[in-house]
Amino acid sequence: MTVSADALASFAVFADHLNFTRAAADLHISQPALHVKVRKLADELGRPLYHRDGRRLVLTADGEAVARFARSHDERLAQFLSEFAGATSTRPVVLAAGQGAYLYLLGDTIRAMLAEEPTRLRLINCDHRQMITAVRSGQAHLGVSVLDALPDDLTVTELATFPQVLLAPAGHRLARRRRLTLRDLDGSALVVPPQQRPQRVLLERSLRAAGAGWTVAVEAEGWPLICHFAALGVGLAIVNGCVPAPPGLVAKPITDLPSVTYHVVHQPSAVHDPRVAALLQRLHGAAR
């Protein structure tokens, strides 16, 4: 079996985009030429490296492993060349996380790192499934998210845990209660995420189990828009406890909803990289 360094480097770029047109443009080669490189690499390895899921291209588990090795090979080569030239490597640590984590959990750490060295950190904004893929394929060194299932092939540690809280107008009857249960929400109109989102699934299941009837006031994507609709009086909202209550709203814990935990995810070997270990230490320090 022979695999060229050029084929690995090209596949790493393709894995970043999962789009032949954009990857070929980044590599300054034609799209057919990139197709040939990727197909030849798959043939040499004897495994399919990606497949089509509807209109999207998705890496297979083998494709993720090849992409991870290709990026690791590229990093080691860049590190060697920097040391050989007597220079300091400037390759950044890559962090993948979702909107909520960036807005309410990671801001201080990111601000501090960028103030020390602007090129030290690169960020990817994605949902929790894309984050897992980014870490598995080596596109990101670390990922932060709330997870509905913990991956058994990656190292996962708890970062911070928050209760789930109800956001209600200060004058609302529920705002005068110290603590709430799901049953107290019977008959309420709620601002909720779109269907199939993890929090929406959890809410529907929990409210049904509690025997609380409710209606959808409006569906909204992301905590800022959910909070905005609640502040407008469109409906009540249930959010993670790290989300600050907008002016005019109060936050009340819901005792029979499970707490929400943000996790840090990385490859088991990632902590051997001092840059990644330093960022991991900062994240846990800030969370404490």
Image: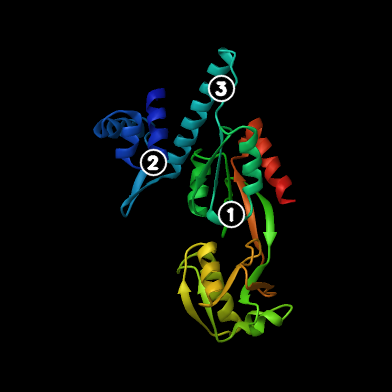
Does residue 275 appear to the left or right of 56 in the view shown?
A: right
Q: At which x and y percent is residue 217?
A: 48, 78
* Callout 1 secondary element: helix
Residue sitting at 57 percent across and 79 percent down?
Answer: 207
For the residue marked with disc 2, what is the amino acid?
A: His
| Image quadrant in which you'd find residue 180 | bottom right
Residue sitting at 24 percent across and 33 percent down?
Answer: 32
1 or 2: tag closer to the N-terminus: 2
Q: At which x and y percent is residue 257?
A: 65, 72
Q: Nearer the viewer, mark 1 or mark 2?
A: 1
Residue 191 vs residue 27, the one in the foreground: 191
| Residue designated by label 3 | 79
Residue sitting at 38 percent across and 24 percent down?
Answer: 6
The quarter of the rendered structure image containing the N terminus is top left
Asked whether residue 100 is in view, the answer is: yes
Mark 1–mark 3 distance (CA, rounded to whole Å): 32 Å
Classify 10 Å Cα crowding around label 3: few (below 14), some (14-19), many (20 and above). Answer: some
For the residue marked with disc 1, what is the amino acid?
A: Leu
| Residue designated by label 1 | 103
Residue sitting at 68 percent across and 51 percent down?
Answer: 159
For the residue marked with disc 3, what is the amino acid?
A: Gln
